[in-house]
Amino acid sequence: MLIKSLKNMAELCFLITILLCSVLPVLQGNSGSLYAQISWSGYMENYNAVTTTGRNELISGRNQLRLNLLASLPDGRAYVSSDIRNNYSFSPDSVNYTLREAWVELYLPDSDLRIGRQVIVWGQADGAFIADLISPVDFSEFLTRSFDDLRTGVDAISYTRYFGSNSLQLVANPVFQPYTLPPPGSRWDVRPPVPDSLNSRIEPAGQHTITLRDMQAAVRLSLRPTAGSDLNMAVMYWRPGLPAYRKTLQITEESGFRLPELLNLKERYRPTIITTVSSVFRLAGNLNSQTEIAWYHRRDADYLPENVSFERINELLATDTQNLPIEEIIRLAGEIDFITRSLEADSANGLLRAKPLISGMTGLRYARSGWLVSAQYLGELIIDYEELLLQDEYYHSATLLMQRSFRRDTMTLRAFTRYNFNGDDFWINPEWQYDISDGISLRIGGHFFGGKLPEAGYGHVHFRNFASNSFIYGGVRAYW
């Protein structure tokens, strides 16, 4: 009867987690050495975000419970971290359970073996993912979540062999886990470039029988030549977490003319070989240089056939033909028919071209006396570029992070900004955080988006599209 009364599996997982975290501390004090090695921690947070434009809408309101369980074993350790969220801005009774991490780690001679869902961080770029490609990212609520909550666990086997201060890490992932994107039609929806006047529909990649062809693997060599320098080199056979979209047209015929009715966008995750290099070198005192480079053997880019443009498609499909002479209507229909046939002719490859790509970051980081300043320059270069591609041949941006701690590190002021040169758009995130007591923290901040309006068919994410979503937020978090 109890199980039947549960609304969904999230509530069952919630009860199990609460039971574990309640019983294990009791066992800790009443049994042997094995249970004496068990500890648990976590936090409870209330978070609210309100838009700064329009009617000041509550775009995110939630209660979040984080539970972490750590058990020290005779020759290793086990760890479980889970989230229970009540997103009352969507539904007062909503309950969502997420298993962030669940792994067992074994200590072997000069090596570690970790099996299960785990967060693997291989990058150091601010507000971007260049070499950090292993763990998936949850963008379902975009930036209404803290940066630490965006990265989620990947189901993998990770083996690390140590050679003094150096190490070699092998990672195998049997099941690909894509990034979690906002649902289509939501205010954070990030769609590929499509004509505004053409109806479109996103089709998920779908499920299939998992085989050895789905296996992903990565190897990373980490060198520590001096106390102030790190050099990391990795090679992986992996799928980028963000999808490309294969495009197919649904056609209708009128008076012998072929006219577009719906553009279907099917997610595709193409596996490829990726090589990354990252480094940190101490230049002087507390000043470090940072570098990351990732080379993709091939990555999909969108394109339109020759003599077809977004501007012309939007203009033709938006034309009011009610008062036009029949000759002009026939001419417009003929031009739409030509565009339709051009798109159909390239539909076999989904209007995608696979190209080599280089992504990189270089920057400086300074930390001293409560100050942290990080300035980074990021760029992407498409090799063997064609003018038909919608993405720019070279896309670049810059980020600046400034942080200052006060009152014995109980209060922190932080400001982060990113500016994209190609689109002339920006994102600014100021935040104030104060530790009211040892176990209670308060944070207040905002995310502001803007820039000039993008051109039709702009091939990159543009922050100006989220200008109406700019918001301020506040959260109270209790730790234990």
Image: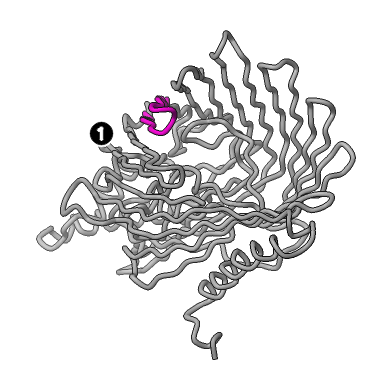
Using the image, determine if residue 1 lies above or below residue 400.
Answer: below
**Total marks drawn?**
1
Question: Which sits in the foreground, 275 or 303?
Answer: 275
Chief secondary structure of the magenta span?
A: strand
User: Which quadrant would the N terminus be assigned to in this image?
Assistant: bottom right
Q: Is residue 82 left or right of residue 449?
A: right
Tell whether position 110 is magenta: no
Q: Which residue is mark 1?
A: 452
Please name the colour scheme applied to the rendered image. one colour
* Residue located farthest toward the bottom when viewing the structure as drawn: 1
Query: Where in the figure is residue 42, as x and y percent of width and height?
Result: 53, 53
Question: What kind of element bears circle 1?
Answer: loop
Q: Which residues are magenta?
A: 398-419
Q: Answer with the quarter of the image where residue 472 lies.
A: top left
The answer to if 402 sits in the magenta stretch is yes
Q: Is residue 346 visible?
A: no
Residue 30, image x, y percentages: 72, 65
Residue located at (50% from left, 59% from top): 266
Instruction: Name the side, left or right, on which 465 lies relative to 31.
Output: left
How far from the left and from the top, in percent, is residue 237?
A: 71, 43
Q: From the viewer's perspective, is 230 left or right of 359?
A: right
Residue drawn at (59%, 41%) of the image? 299
Q: Quadrant of residue 40?
A: bottom right
Q: Along the horizontal axis of the image, is 352 left or right of 222?
A: left
| Visible residue check, residue 104 | yes
